[in-house]
Image: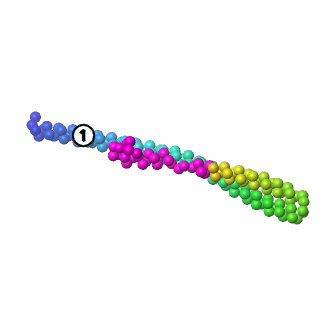
Amino acid sequence: MSYQDHQDDGSTRSLSNVGELFADISRDLSTLVRQEMELAKVEMRESATKAGKGAGMLAGAGVAGHFVLLFLSVAAWWGLGNQIGRGWSALVVAAVWAVIAAVLAARGRREIKQVKGIPQTTKTAREIPDALKGNEDHA
């Protein structure tokens, strides 16, 4: 076996190892990106659910608030018109709607404050550049 033959065998082996290394890196990077996308989907779904609940409760509070204004207006009208009787009953109904609106608004606000976005995806995405450099423990 000549020197040239020996040199060709070594470089072929090196290129094969480098090719395998790049294939492994490409496969691992592809897996990492897929996993990050899946994590982002799960976190977004959770955040959207909480935001939807909070928004629904705030919408309910808006409807209830509308009824408060409606019944307060009717109560003031009937109360001033009759001095007693039907107007007071409308005030009671308006007070009940006021309590409902307050409860829905408080619960809706609490739900919206609990929305945290996609914290795990953000954290792991920040670690990718260090991991690619071989500094997994740096982040």
Q: Residue at x 66, y 49 (%)?
A: 107
Main SS category, magenta section: helix
On screen, 44 above or below 76?
Answer: above
Type of amino acid under label 1:
Ser
Q: Magenta stretch containing residue 117, yes or no?
A: yes
Position in image of residue 1 (x %, y %) = 10, 34
Q: Residue at x 26, y 42 (%)?
A: 18
Outermost residue toward the top?
1
Task: Tell me if residue 29 can be seen.
Answer: no
Q: Quadrant of residue 81?
A: bottom right
Q: Magenta stretch containing residue 31, yes or no?
A: no
Residue closer to the observer: 18 or 103: 103
Position in image of residue 108 (x %, y %) = 65, 51
Outermost residue toward the left?
2
Residue where numbered disc 1 is placed: 16
Position in image of residue 90 (x %, y %) = 83, 57
Left or right relative to 71: residue 81: right
Residue closer to the observer: 137 or 111: 137
On screen, 85 above or below 116?
Answer: below
Q: Which residues are magenta?
A: 111-139
Secondary structure at badge 1 equals helix
Residue closer to the observer: 2 or 125: 125
Q: Residue at x 60, y 51 (%)?
A: 112
Left or right relative to 66: residue 6: left
Please name the colour scheme applied to the rendered image.
rainbow
Residue closer to the observer: 81 or 16: 81
Left or right relative to 50: residue 73: right
Q: Quadrant of the C terminus?
A: top left
